[in-house]
Amino acid sequence: MKKKFALTFVSLASVALLAACGEVSTTGNSGSSSANAGTEVGKTLKVGFNFEETGDVASYGTAEQKGAQLAVDEINKAGGVDGKQIEVTDKDNKSELSEAATVSTNLVTQAKVNAIVGPATSGGTGAAVTNAAKASVPLVTPSGTQDDLTKGQEYLFRATFIDSFQGKILSKYVTDNLKAKKVVLYYDNSSDYAKGMAKAFQEAYKGEIVATETFASKDTDFQAALTKFKDKDFDALVVPGYYTEAGKIVNQARGMGIDKPIVGGDGFNSEEFIAQATPAAATNVYYVSGYSTSGDMTEKAKKFLDAYKAKYNEEPSMFSALAYDSVYMVAEAAKGAKTSVDIKDNLAKLKDFEGVTGSITMDKDHNPVKSALMLGLKDGKVVTVETVKP
């Protein structure tokens, strides 16, 4: 998930917890060795939620909070973990980096949680992990995709695939499925998420990129760039970015008569994307996803879908499903655990864990090894679901 905000100086008080520029450092001692023995698993298993429940990317955070809470409810109803009920402390980081760091501090020092689920975004996760690691408490981000986010971070794990993986998936899909020999690349230059995906796409794509243009977060008028593309000879428009801008790009492109396939990453995966694009314009659009309620589904995924709809009266998004899996990953790792350090160790050993988003095995950098889906839209509805491996 995932929106990344460039980690500029937030405030002197909070930046003391962060790297001085770019992203939080993943090579220092922020995520590795800690003399702290961690938090003890007592009569309950204490889990903290650190989600973007309000603010710029609340669409991601609220979906993840719902998926995570559903998992907790199910586990508790089934008897808990080793007979222990999961006790949740739910905090809203307001889609702000400084608040994500503050929430993390509160969860480990005040609530004494044994594990944290969230934030949804890579920027928020980078801000939150420092103090979680200092307290020897593992943090699982459902949807933080930045490539180097987990590198060197002993206490950080994720349930989703990384940005460069998505760039390779996009290259594979436009080449093999869309038969696109020429593309236009139009990406969010203010987002590490989009830049990482665009770079991987450029390196993997063997066809011709006839034009490359960039936009920035919070831009609303894309017609100047689209006018440059309109009369060029190309087969697909590749748009690494978030729903907040990508939806408007799709709407404006279709309004200008650009009818070529538009392809993007999992940042498109939001009902808000359809709202921004409008259903009529959201046709011949394809994006990466780790989960879909369409196409073939496992029995576990079907049960999750039914339970989610029964609880919230809506269909789950990929973000809901990833957060649901994240809680179950923590629960699996908490079996037999005496402290949060044990949970961390068990998460690192996770292998062939069957989630609703697929089978998950942790690699050495705490990234899940899993395949991806490409969803195709017509009139704002998913009409095709294809599994793609780079």
Image (cartoon, rainbow, N blue to C red):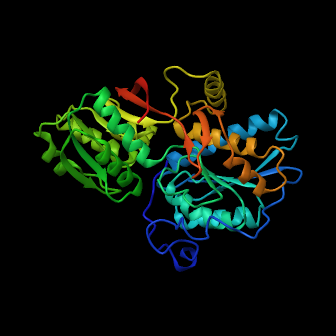
Quadrant assignment, res 299: top right
Where 386 sits versus 62, above or below? above
Q: Where is residue 373 shown, x and y percent of the image? A: 45, 31
Where 32 sits versus 332, above or below? below
Q: Where is residue 161 shown, x and y percent of the image? A: 50, 43
Q: Residue furthest bottom?
A: 12
Front residue of this view, candidates 164 and 300: 164
Instruction: Tell me what residue is drawn at x 71 percent, y 68 percent.
Output: 34
Indicate left or right for 228 with 349 as reference. Answer: left
Front residue of this view, candidates 340 and 11: 340
Instruction: Tell me what residue is drawn at x 49 percent, y 20 percent.
Output: 295
Q: Is residue 282 visible?
A: no
Quadrant assignment, res 254: top left
Indicate left or right for 52 with 345 as reference. Answer: left
Front residue of this view, candidates 342 and 123: 342
Q: Is residue 131 visible?
A: yes
Q: Where is residue 234 shown, x and y percent of the image? A: 17, 36
> Looking at the figure, which quarter contains the C terminus?
top left
